[in-house]
Structures are given as structure tokens and as C-alpha cells.
Amino acid sequence: MVLEIIKAGHPVLKQVAEPVDFVNKKMRQLLDDMAETMRVSDGVGLAAPQVNVSKRIIVVDDGTGLQEFINPVIVKGDGEQIGLEGCLSVPGYFGDVKRYQDIEVHYIDRHNKKKKLKAEGFLARIIQHEIDHLDGILFIEKVEALIARVGGTVEKVDRWGKRRLAYAVKKFTDGFYVLVNFEADPAEIKEIDRVLKINDDVLKHLIVKHGK
């Protein structure tokens, strides 16, 4: 069954999820439903809080197959990588986030067996992103720069890029985006919101995070 993915602003996304005491039939069904939801949503990871279930469960698929983690704990992290991330709970927004390059994660599987996994690169990034959800953290609270999809013409985007230091224009294969500089004055961020119609909850994260 495909589940509803809740969006930024929902209180469950800001809660620390509860550990799973025992993986029963209901939890296994949740794992199946989360995997289906992730796939139909074109995601690479999904955490239980994103489907309004405050439990420490994540599913990921980096292209090599589905992996399930219950009560995951990162016990070791090494190196550093910075890469572009998005989130099914914050649709339309992307940003560069700093993560460990290599991690070791301990968890239990759907059969209540203790497991451990060493992951690197993209898989490590996905796991870290999803575990953040279990601690009530959204990627927009960690981004070094937020990228928001912009409607309208290229000329409009270019005009804004030239007029304000708060912006830099970045082109992707499927459209144009505006890179928001977090040093922007709150008044400018509000103007960005007015013009680009940035989601109010995302806007609030930007202002609160930087103490404006």
C-alpha cells in the first residue's frame, strides 16, 4: 500500500522517533508499504516519520537493491563528502549537505536479527539523511545552500540573479534553479518567498537556522 508522505511543517517530522522493541507482523507490513511508497515516489530513501509513524525505521535503495534498517545507529564515521540532496518531505528543494564519506551502522532486520553494515559514498549519504529524520532533523537545517525550483522564463531568473547578491543561478538538465545565499537579509528572504512562492515552512527554517 502506498502511504501518504507528510511535508515540512508537520510536527511528527520534528520529533525524535521511538525505537522498535520487536519487529512484528505490523512492522513488517510497514516496511513493505514504505518500500512501495519510496519507489512510486522516485525516492532513494524513506524514514517512518515521513509517513507519520514515529518509529526508528528507514528503507533505502541506492540503485543496488532495497535495504531495511530498524533502530539504526551510526557507530563510526570517517572522511567527508559534500553533495546535493533532496527530500520527499520537502519537495522542490535541493541543497549541498556535508556528510561522512564512510560509515558503519548497526541495526536489526525485519527478523529481529542484529546486523551491521559498512557503507560509503552515495549509500552512506542516504543512510545519514534518513537517520536524521529519526532524530527530527530535516536536510534543510544542514544545507550550505538551498536550491529552489523556479518557474517562469530564463530572462526572469537571470534578471533576479543580476539584481541581488542573495542569488546565484544554477542550471540543471531539467530546468533552472535559484541558489539562495544564507547570508541574505531576512527581508530579502521574504522577498524571495513572495516572488518564488517558497514554502512557508522552508522559509521559517532558513530564518530560524541563521538566527535572523
Image (tube, rainbow, N blue to C red):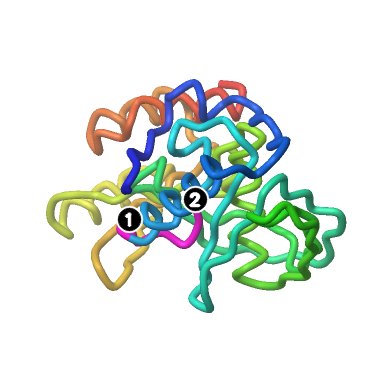
Quote the CA–CA distance across marks 1 and 2: 10 Å
Q: Position of residue 29 (x, y in %)?
A: 47, 47
Mark 2 = which residue? 46
**Corner quadrant of residue 109:** bottom right
Q: Position of residue 6 (x, y in %)?
A: 38, 34
Q: Identify the residue at horizontal 35%, vertical 25% (top origin).
A: 200
Mark 1 = which residue? 41
Q: Was residue 118 drawn as part of the magenta stretch in this picture?
A: no
Left or right: where 118 falls relative to 190: right
Q: Identify the residue at horizontal 43%, vertical 24% (top origin).
A: 10
Q: Identify the residue at horizontal 23%, vertical 51% (top origin).
A: 159
- The amino acid beneath tag 1 is Ser
* Predominant SS along the magenta part: loop
Q: Position of residue 20 (x, y in %)?
A: 68, 37
Identify the magenta region.
Answer: 40-45
Q: Crowding at label 1, few (<14), some or many (≥20) Cα neighbours within 10 Å?
A: few
Instruction: Look at the numbered disc 2 and give the secondary structure of its residue.
Output: strand
Of 184 and 151, nearer the camera is 151
Q: Position of residue 129 (x, y in %)?
A: 60, 51
Identify the mark nearer the N-term, 1 or 2.
1
Which residue is farthest left? 153
- The amino acid beneath tag 2 is Leu
How many marks are shown on the rendered structure?
Answer: 2
Of 45 and 70, nearer the camera is 70
Asked if residue 139 can be seen in this view, the reply is no
Considering only vertical position in the picture, is 95 above or below 65? Answer: above
Which image quarter holds the C terminus?
Answer: top right
Residue contact at pointers 1 and 2, CB within 8 angstroms: yes
Left or right: where 144 falls relative to 196: right
Left or right: where 156 falls relative to 187: left
**Corner quadrant of residue 103:** bottom right
Label number found at residue 108: none
